[in-house]
Amino acid sequence: MKSAVIVFPGSNCDRDAAVALHQASGKPPAMVWHGDSDLPDLDLVVLPGGFSYGDYLRVGAIAALSPIMAAVVRHAERGGAVFAICNGFQMACEAGLLPGVLMNNAAGKYVCRHVAMRVEDTQSPFTVGYQAAQRISIPVAHHDGNYFADDATLDRLEGEGLVAFRYDNDNPNGSRRDIAGILSANRRVLGMMPHPERAADPDLGGTDGAAMFRSLVETLA
């Protein structure tokens, strides 16, 4: 599997994602600077977590206008896989890769802890390594993780089976319908607020996120 992690000013989980990809695939991903305008030949692009551009203006909004994002959108339109984690999820929504928006946490506070999630989908390249309704623990670290979309959009996501993960009686941010992660219509883009790259090694306190990276290697290689 050929992969790349996009690096933005303010990214702080780009290296974590790279380590998880390297461990799962045996190959280090390319690290692509946000100011570049082209991507190498790839199977997977990761938009990592962090605080791109200091979260100024609106989370993910400035990063979505970075030169590399046009190439990321083209990659997705060709059917390439995009894994958008935390700040990356915010970017993906701002860039139109996924519907909805991420708003301030309902409690108005930054939250950083493990949360319980339920696997809702097992048919995407990201989730085939899980069982339906499997309960997993993945850390979150965000101030703006409150997923919002209108009822029609939420009904479509539900009806088409595009809700990938749901907070399991442990919603840390007020996201509508307890949504923790969603898929694009072709199931090749996943956006999620929790950080699976922080739960992919026993030394980090858990391995429930490792199956996402193994799933990608198995399905995209």
Image (spheres, helix red, strand yellow):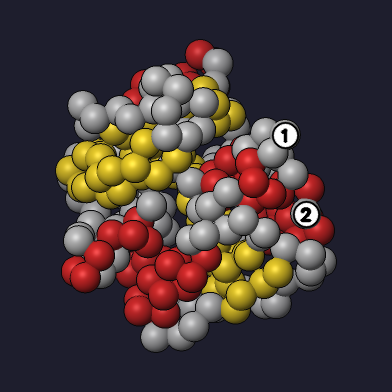
**Mark drawn on residue 66:** 2
Would you identify the image quadrant in which residue 119 lies?
top left
Q: Nearer the viewer, residue 186 or 34?
A: 34
Q: Position of residue 183 (x, y in %)?
A: 48, 42
Q: Nearer the viewer, residue 134 or 8?
A: 8
Which numbered disc, 1 or 2, marks the residue closer to the eye?
A: 1
Would you identify the image quadrant in which residue 16 lies?
bottom left
For the residues labelled 1 and 2, the Cα–Cα distance comes to 14 Å
Q: Is residue 81 positioned above or below 121 on the image?
A: below
The residue at the point 48 percent across, 61 percent down is 13
The residue at the point 42 percent across, 34 percent down is 110
**Mark drawn on residue 79:** none
Amino acid bearing label 2: Ser
Q: Mark 1 Cα within 10 Å, few/some/many (few <14, many 20+)?
A: few
Q: Which residue is mark 1?
A: 57
Q: Is residue 60 left or right of residue 184?
A: right
Q: Position of residue 215 (x, y in %)?
A: 35, 65
Of the image marks 1 and 2, the number of the one nearer the N terminus = 1
Q: Secondary structure at mark 2?
A: loop
Q: Is residue 95 positioned above or below 149 on the image?
A: below
Residue 162 visible in the current orientation: no
Q: Position of residue 158 (x, y in %)?
A: 41, 26
Q: Nearer the viewer, residue 116 or 183?
A: 116
Amino acid bearing label 1: Leu
Q: Secondary structure at mark 1?
A: loop
Q: Nearer the viewer, residue 55 or 138?
A: 55
Q: Is residue 79 positioned above or below 36 on the image?
A: above
